[in-house]
Amino acid sequence: MPRTDLLRVTVAAVALFLVAATLALRLDDYLLYVVTLGAIFATLAVSFDVLLGYTGYLSLAHGALFGVGAYACGILTAHHGWPFWAALPAAGLVAGAAGAVIALLAFRTRGLYFAVLTLGIGLIGHQLFLVLAGLTGGVGGFVGIPSPGRPDWVPLDQNGWNALLALALLLATFLAAQLFVRSRLGAACLAVREDLTLAQALGIRVGQARLAAFVFSAIFTGFAGALFAAISNFVAPESFTVLGAGFQLVALVVVGGMGTLWGPILGAALLTALPEALRVASGYSLMAYGVLLLVFVIFAPRGLASLATAGLARLRTGAGFRAAPAGERRP
Amino acid sequence: MKPFSGIGAACALAMLATPLWADEIVVGDLHPITGPANFYGLPESRAIQLAVEEINAAGGLSVGGESHTFRIQTEDTQANPTVGVSALKKLVSSDVRFVIGPLSSGVGPALFPIIDRSDAITQIIDGTIAEGVTNGRNIFRNQATVSQYDVSVVALFKAKGYGSVTMMTDRFHAGFVGTQPALAASLKELGAEIAGEEGYKLGDTDFSATLTRVASRNPDVLLIRGYPAEGALITKQARQLGFEGQVVWEMVSPPSTVLKNISAAEMEGVYNCIPATTEDYIALGNEKAIALEEAYRARFNEPAGELSVLSYDAVHILKAAIEKAGSLENAAVNAALADLTVEEVPQLISDYVPGEGGQLFDDKGQVTLRSAVSVWQGEGWHPATDVIR
């Protein structure tokens, strides 16, 4: 892909970040918190899209990797006195290392077996958060995680600073993912997704590509976990269950649009805002969530991204548009 | 006159009875209105509503010579920490400075660091029994802790002289899991052998494997710690598998929830070791509890929840503290709460043990609720006065 295209994406992403940050910082603390959570889940979704959208492997262990990053940050900052800025990269590396181990084990399988194997790993991870109470606080949760340090020269309160960090992490993750998918490894990942046997026959180093995608995804999932822990000041195992965080990631990417990187950001924005918007009728919140998933899988399987792209194309040409039906392959 | 008699008419006249210039004090009601714990949370929220309507109908609050009324802003925690934090942020953004709740042992610790470092929020916890979520500065609790629940268990073992026990605990309940080692140690000190410690989780329905093991050990007591839906199933399946010992519960357990999973006959004789709940106070003839029950039934067409008395009390505690402070400033109200005596809140229903000097809260902001044991007889729980008077 031409370098100018990457430059254009970068400029657009930075511009959108600046707009989002400027608008967000005008919001009250509650809406700012919703934006902060949305940005963290968007970071998770983008990093997950690198694996699911670009290699086609469905991991259900990412909820646990999110927890690994969160607990690593909590332990390093609260128990060992590390500053947040040292704990953040360390948490990413710990999650990346855990991701590498999981990947080496899980890539012995494919398809449904890969999903089931990572499901098992996700369950083990969640149980470990409960059992290792000395480190994690067990079922009672990990209390007293320090907030991300705010420099004196920053003219924001802690809530504004948290939101800015979450948006900045999303920007960094998105740009890093753009670089990754445009690299030789990214191209190899696409080949793996489209036809594993053909990729192997062409001499593409399939194992290396898949491993790199998984580790990349795990590192940024760990970053998101670390920031989530520092912003919440508290984490508990129930935030990192397979049925909770694990499947939620899948939903964010499917609703947003797999293999686009920007679609999952839309998915995260929608699926974070929806439960908050439905607070007054929270009994219907989960139902609305389920209906949305059904609608997208049946009528727009390539997610919000495909709807947005088709809408833009329609505006340009004046022609009608339709979302791709289920089962239609990407170009 | 009963506090709730004619409440319907009183509420209708509330706006007339209350001066039009009365300022509103918004109370944040933070409970699980939906989700797996809503059978606890909704009755708590409704009791807050009733208490507020009663106070407003009686003329509201007098703060430094000015008249004020309460208004409730309810936010749903869904018993989920992330949703709970979001709900609190929403209250704070709406400039709500007095909060009652939450219920869940998962949500309480998640809210603690936010409220602990704030000087603009005063919290009265009426639900969660998790340890370490009060500070005596701006966070107070009029609910018991798990340790206080355990006191009732120890009292029962002491009274009955049981020789062995197997504990079955919801392993995701932070409070029960946290105090299990201390409870086991206390029971051992009484001479009871710990025959086993088993775990289960909310939503489990088949306990046959675990209970077969329990039945084979044949302990004197099967102690179940967690939630009533599972408690009922465990009790039922234990009996079906031949367990003949005493079943003891340690949980807030509305009969309506219990009886969904077990018959009243199968529950006969089961003990429950928690401080007295709404139903106990009614059974003991507490007039204020009876009045609350009548008002609740009249308004919502169903009985009050087991924890409704605590939520009702929490509103009156807040009212008393604000009036004592003579100010709406959080710092002044916090100081008044810390200094509040049981006698200064005559509307209280629950049986609080006053501290030295008659204070309601200790220096950590925690009340002491009198220990109690109930026994299932007929269709519900009744005070086991032969165990604890």
Image (cartoon, coloured by chain):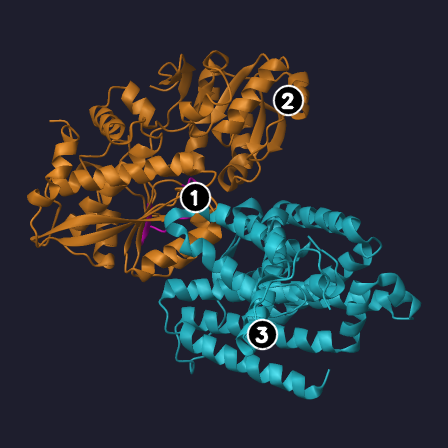
Chain colours: A cyan, B orange
Residue A157 in view: yes
In the picture, measured across the screen, residue B24 lies left or right of residue A196, that is: left
Tell me residue A265's x, y (percent).
56, 67
Q: Which residue is mark 1?
A: A283
Magenta residues span B128-140
Amino acid carrying label 1: it is: Gly
Q: Which quarter of the figure is the C terminus of chain B placed in?
A: top left
- The image shows a total of numbered marks equal to 3
Q: Secondary structure at mark 3?
A: helix
Residue in the picture at 78% in, 73% down: A187
In the displayed structure, B346 sits above or below A308; it is: above
Front residue of this view, candidates A125 and B245? A125
In the picture, measured across the screen, residue B154 lies left or right of residue B220, that is: left
Depth check, mark 2 against mark 1: the one in front is: 1
Q: Which quarter of the figure is the N terminus of chain B placed in?
A: top left
Q: Give the distance between the C-alpha atoms of the residues marked 2 and 1, in whole angstroms.
A: 35 Å
Q: Secondary structure at mark 2?
A: helix
Q: Earlier in the sequence, mark 3 or mark 1?
A: 1
- Give yes or no for residue A215 being in the magenta stretch: no
Q: Please check whether the numbered discs 3 and 2 fall on a single chain.
A: no
Front residue of this view, candidates B245 and A199? A199
Amino acid carrying label 2: it is: Leu
Q: Give the distance between the C-alpha atoms of the residues marked 3 and 2, in whole angstroms.
A: 63 Å
Q: Which residue is mark 3?
A: A313
Tell me residue A73's x, y (percent).
59, 63
Q: Give the distance between the C-alpha atoms of the residues marked 3 and 1, in whole angstroms.
A: 38 Å
Amino acid carrying label 3: it is: Ala
Tell me residue A174's x, y (percent).
61, 73
Q: Secondary structure at mark 1?
A: helix
**Within the image, what quadrant is residue A324 found in?**
bottom right
